[in-house]
Image: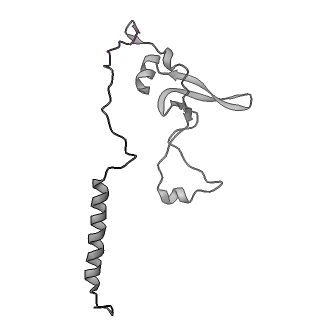
Amino acid sequence: MSDTGVDPNEALADEWAAALEQQETQEVAPKKNQAKAASAKFQELENEVLSESDGEVSLDSILDVPVIISMEIGRTHIPIRNLLQLNQGSVVELDRLAGEPMDVLVNGTLIAQGEVVVVNEKFGIRLTDVISPSDRIKRLR
């Protein structure tokens, strides 16, 4: 017991009871700014057939979508320990031989292979093996 003659456990229980009572009265009383919910009404969706010609879907809607093209000269697997030790001048050995074709990737998907060329003092790639347009579309899906 404390000096005031009130048991601390009893005082704590009274505080909890008062808090619970206050919470119950707040939940029961309707809020002034509370909006009433109504069910939403939607129109029925209609089945639409995409325009197709000769069994192919028209690509006009996606022709202007930008994509990322990257060229990959090779890959390797190294432990994180070796990765953390890389610094300026380090050499990383790749899985391809010098002169082998590079992979051309669109959004990470292989679409062609080619060889490195220099065009106006910049690197470029001459495509040597290109996947057919229909196969490219299938791979991009």
Q: Horizontal and vertical percent for residue 66? A: 56, 27
119 on left or right of 136: right
Q: Residue furthest bottom?
A: 3
140 on left or right of 122: left
Q: Residue at x 53, y 44 (%)?
A: 94
Most foreground residue, 8 or 50: 8
Q: Horizontal and vertical percent for residue 116? A: 62, 30
Q: Horizontal and vertical percent for residue 30? A: 32, 50
Instruction: Classify 44 as above or below 105.
Output: above
23 on left or right of 87: left
**48 inside magenta stretch:** yes
Tell me the chief SS of the magenta region: loop
Number of marks present in the image shown: 0
- Quadrant containing the C terminus in the rendered view: top left
Q: Residue at x 47, y 29 (%)?
A: 110
- Quadrant containing the N terminus in the rendered view: bottom left
**95 inside magenta stretch:** no
Magenta stretch: give its range.
46-51
Occupied quadrant, residue 27: bottom left
Q: Residue at x 49, y 60 (%)?
A: 81
Q: Residue furthest right?
A: 120
Most foreground residue, 25 or 39: 25
Q: How is the image coloured?
A: one colour
Most foreground residue, 106 or 64: 64
Q: Horizontal and vertical percent for residue 132? A: 46, 18
Instruction: Classify 9 as above or below 1.
Output: above
Instruction: Classify 56 as above or below 6.
Output: above
